[in-house]
Amino acid sequence: MKPSRAALLVAAAALTPALLFTTPAFATGSTATSTTATATSETPVDDMSEEDLRIAILRILANKDSGKAVVREANKALDGTVEDMRNFLETGYRLAQAEDDRVAIFRILYLANKNGDKAVIREANKALDDGSPEALRAFLETGYRLAQAEDDRVAIARILADPTISDALRAAAEEAIDGTPEELRYFLEVGQYKVDS
C-alpha cells in the first residue's frame, strides 16, 4: 500500500525539528548540495576489485551530506558480498539517494505549507508527482532555490504595497526585489529589520 501524501506530511512535521538543519539554507548563500558523490573512479563497476568497491562505498559514507537511506544501504552493501557492493554502486545508491531526497522534499513542503510559499509548494509537488530520482534531485539542487526566490519576491512586493513603510525600508525593498535568490532571502530574514532599527 502506498502511503498518502497527508500521512507523509504528518511524519515530516514530526521529524522537522530534529532534521531541520539538513535542509538548504539560503540566508548563508548555500543551496542544497548534491549528495551524489563520485562513487567510482573511471573504472567501470564491473571491473573494480573488491577493495576498489569498498573504497568507493566508503567515500560515499564519508560524504557528510549522505542521508539515512544512503548510509543504511551502503552499510548493507559493505556487510554483503562483492555482488551486493556492485549492485549498490550501480543502482542501489541512486535509489537510496532518491529516498533521502524525497524525505528532504517532504520537510521542505511541510515548512512551505506553514509559510504559505505557493511556488515552493507547486514545484515540490511537481517533483514528488514525477517521483524519478532525477526530478527529486533537480528540485533540491535548483528548483527549490528558484521557487523560494519567486515566493520571496511576492513577499517583498507585499512589503512595498504597504503605504505606511518608511522611505528607507521602501528603498531597501526596491533594491532587494531585483536581487539574487540569496539576496531576497537575506532581505526578508535580516535586512528589512536592520533598515528600521
Image: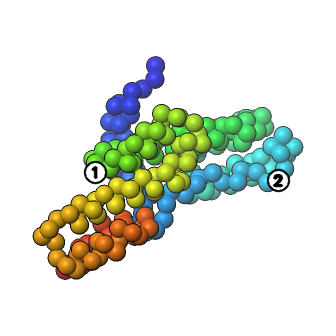
Q: Residue at x 76, y 51 (%)?
A: 40
State the residue position of label 1. Answer: 115
**Residue in the foreground of this view, choosing between 115 and 9:** 115
Q: Residue furthest left?
A: 164
Quick check: 160 above or below 46? below
Instruction: Return the x and y of residue 66 as percentages of the image width and height.
Output: 57, 51
Which quadrant would residue 196 be assigned to in this image?
A: bottom left
Using the rendered image of the protein, determine whether residue 158 is visible from the camera's viewpoint: yes
Mark 1 or mark 2, earlier in chain: 2
Q: Residue at x 42, y 52 (%)?
A: 147
State the residue position of label 2. Answer: 42
Which quadrant would residue 50 be assigned to in this image?
A: top right
Which quadrant would residue 71 be assigned to in this image?
A: top right
**Residue in the foreground of this view, choosing between 54 and 121:** 121
Q: Name which residue type carries label 2.
A: Glu
Q: How is the image coloured?
A: rainbow
